[in-house]
Amino acid sequence: MSRWKQLWRIVPLLAMLSLLLSGCGQENLSALQPKGPVAEKQLTLITISISVMIFVLIVVFVLYAYVLVKYRRKKGQTEYPKQVEGNHKLEIIWTVIPFFLLLIIAVPTVKYTFELDKDYSKDPNALQVRVSAHQFWWEFEYLDQKVKTAQDLVIPTGRVVSFHLETADVIHSFWVPALGGKKDTNPGMTNYLFLKANEPGVYLGKCAELCGQSHALMDFKVRAVPQEEFDRWITAMQTPTKEPATELAKQGETIFKQSCISCHAIYATDDKGERRVLGGGAGPNLVNFGNRETVAGILYNSDEIGGPIDPEKQKKNVRDWLKDPQKIKPGNMMPNLQKVEGSQMEYVVEGGPLSDQQIDALVEFLVGQKQ
């Protein structure tokens, strides 16, 4: 047998392995490993549907093989076999069986469709979070606590979280596979979705709607923590940061207030000498930026998801992002801090272009923003 024929024979095996391995992935980004009641019920529906489909597939293939063997042309047979039709018993059987199979799928599907679409937006016991989608980042506003953050979402375990889903530009889709199914954010309207985490952990979120050039990079993190830890986080977010500790960080704050504050909100010192949240909302809110798991949602500041932040890695990520954000996340609305040749964002921030030393000062100030 030639080598090419041997290779050709293993193609189906490789195709099957590719199909199986395509289902492998990270535990905290998998709908097949649910971490909350919503995802658990949705997995139940998936399991029922796939089981019914596999059952039908097996029955059809068994009958097909049986007919092929039993009614194949016999040796020496020249005439056509006797043609039969109109067997009422068989027709009733293959009409009734699909009806029952559809019933098995339909009953739990209808039940869970209404149950999982429940609106908790007026429930005082639920945590109310407004989600605003942007090209290509996520903003989270805790409505009752008056706290805003971006990219990293913190929620308490064992408590319903009611999401008010909105968008600032095009259609996006909010999706945390380990906690539940997705729902779109549509321009000019608010959609509602509720999720709940059973146990502490970091779960990955995605935009599930094709929304532009960096759609695949529009990631975010959901960190589920016990209620007591969540309350401490909220209190910390509402507490102003201290003055920058080093001269380099102070220089960075000056640059931030000159070049960045029109788009990004952060704790800074106002003209009266008070520390409070200052800035605009066109870009991500940067309060507690120094404690975030990632920069721009995709550059990890630690060696593993949920692990301790590596300060040097974090500074490198921030520096890389500030120097050329278009290279990391093409099509985003971040302007040039330095004049990067070929960048899609040709305009430069006020006071720019910034030197490498000014970028380093900005990095020092941003990584020091910890609550």
Image (cartoon, grey):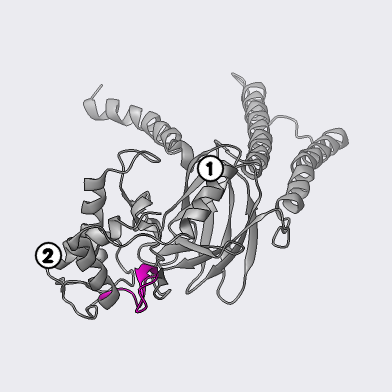
Residue 340 sits in quarter: bottom left
Q: Which residues are magenta?
A: 259-274
Q: The residue under label 1 is which amino acid type?
A: Val
Relative image position of residue 238 (x, y in whole percent):
49, 60
> Does the magenta portion include 262?
yes
Q: The residue under label 2 is which amino acid type?
A: Gln
Give the side of residue 215 with respect to residue 76, left or right.
left
Task: Locate the N terminus by quadrant.
Answer: top left
Task: Locate the C terminus by quadrant.
Answer: bottom left
Relative to 306, does residue 140 appear above or below in the rendering? below
Q: Alpha-carbon distance for marks 2 and 1?
A: 38 Å
Q: Residue at x 51, y 69 (%)?
A: 171
The residue to which callout 1 is attached is: 225
Which badge, 2 or 1, comes first in the chain's sequence? 1
Q: Which mark is residue 357?
A: 2
Give the side of residue 307 with respect to residue 196, left or right.
left
Q: Nearer the viewer, residue 132 or 47?
A: 132
Give the side of residue 39 with respect to residue 300, left or right.
right
Relative image position of residue 351 (x, y in whole percent):
20, 80
Relative image position of residue 101 (x, y in whole percent):
76, 38
